[in-house]
Each structure stands twice: as structure tokens, then as C-alpha cells.
Image: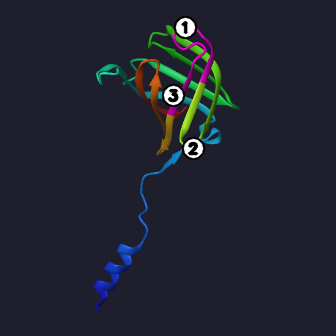
Amino acid sequence: MNAKSVATIVLCSLPFVSLASESTCSNESLEGSWTLNYAKYTNSAGVVVGEIKDKSTLSRKSLVDGTVHFITWTPNGEVKVAASGHYSSANGRYIETVDISTYEGILGKTFDFGCRLENGVWIHEGLENDLTILEKWTKTK
């Protein structure tokens, strides 16, 4: 066997290592203040009925010791939704229960989202009322 064959065997037998930094969510990894960068809302027919990008709508979410507070507002400062409740996260799931809200459509509801951190971006997806949502958040500095 020549050196090239040995090198090929060694390289092929090494475990695959992803260059992207991805992990599941936990209470500890999510604690802090987050800013929404992107969101997509899709109905049950698969039609995109809403999308937030380019700061067309602004949203901030703060998670501390199992308590969540969030606010969504327009670029001109008009508050659209302010809410608070509690959350937990483990095993790739983010579960949020809304106890107080200015928007009745989420008040008292519990949402269960798939959750992961990818290169510092918190991504969660799941059902919110009758819509499938995908949201991408970054830590607020």
C-alpha cells in the first residue's frame, strides 16, 4: 500500500465534524435578550401569509430564570404586542406559555416549538394558533 492509499484510508475513517456551530436549546443557552431578525408565517395550505424581514417589524424577547417578556413594535414606535409569561427549553424544544398579553389571540396559550442554536442564531419553528411559524433571533448586544 502506498502513502496516498494510507492517507485516503485515514481521512475516510475520521469522524465527520461539521464546521457549522449547531446545538439544541436549553434554558441556560437562551437566557438573555434576543432581537427578531426574520420570521415567516405559513398557513395550513402551505401559503406564506406573513413575513418579517429587513426590520419591517421589530421584536425583542427577554428570557430570565424561566420568565419571558416580549414586545413587538413598528419602525415608527407603535407597539403591536406586549406579553409576558414563562418558558422552558430542553431536548430541542422551546415551550412558552403566555400569561399576560395585549393580543388576545395568544393570551393563556402554550406554544411548543422545535428549537436550535445555529452559529449564534436562535431558530424556532412550530405551530402558533393555525400558522406554522419560523423565527430567527440573535442575542441583543
Type of residue at label 1? Glu
Locate residue 51, reporting x and y percent: 35, 21
Q: Which residue is mark 1?
A: 104
The circle on residue 55 is: none
Mark sitting earlier along the chain (3/2) = 3
Residue located at (33% from left, 85% from top): 6
The foreground one among 89 and 6 is 89
- Identify the residue under disc 3: 35
Look at the image and say whether residue 106 sits in the magenta stretch. yes
Give whichever of discs 1 and 2 has the lower sequence position. 2
56 relative position to 141: left or right: left
Residue topped by disc 2:
91
The percent position of residue 119, horizontal first and vertical second, equals 46, 45
Q: Are marks 3 and 2 in contact (CB under 8 Å)?
A: no
Q: Quadrant of residue 10?
A: bottom left
Say if 80 sits above or below 48 in the image: above
Q: Are marks 1 and 2 in contact (CB under 8 Å)?
A: no
* Residue at x 43% of width, y 52% of height: 20
Q: Mark 3 vs mark 1: which is more N-terminal?
A: 3
Residue projecting furthest to the right: 65
- Identity, as a three-letter code, of the amino acid under mark 3: Thr
Q: Secondary structure at mark 1?
A: loop
CA separation in Å, label 3 and label 2: 23 Å
For marks 1 and 2, give the CA distance: 29 Å
Q: Residue at x 42, y 72 (%)?
A: 14
Q: In the rendered structure, which segment of residues is drawn in magenta?
A: 97-113
Task: Quadrant for the N terminus, please.
Answer: bottom left
Where disc 2 sits, the SS reads loop
Q: Residues within 10 Å of mark 1 (few under 14, many from 20)?
A: few
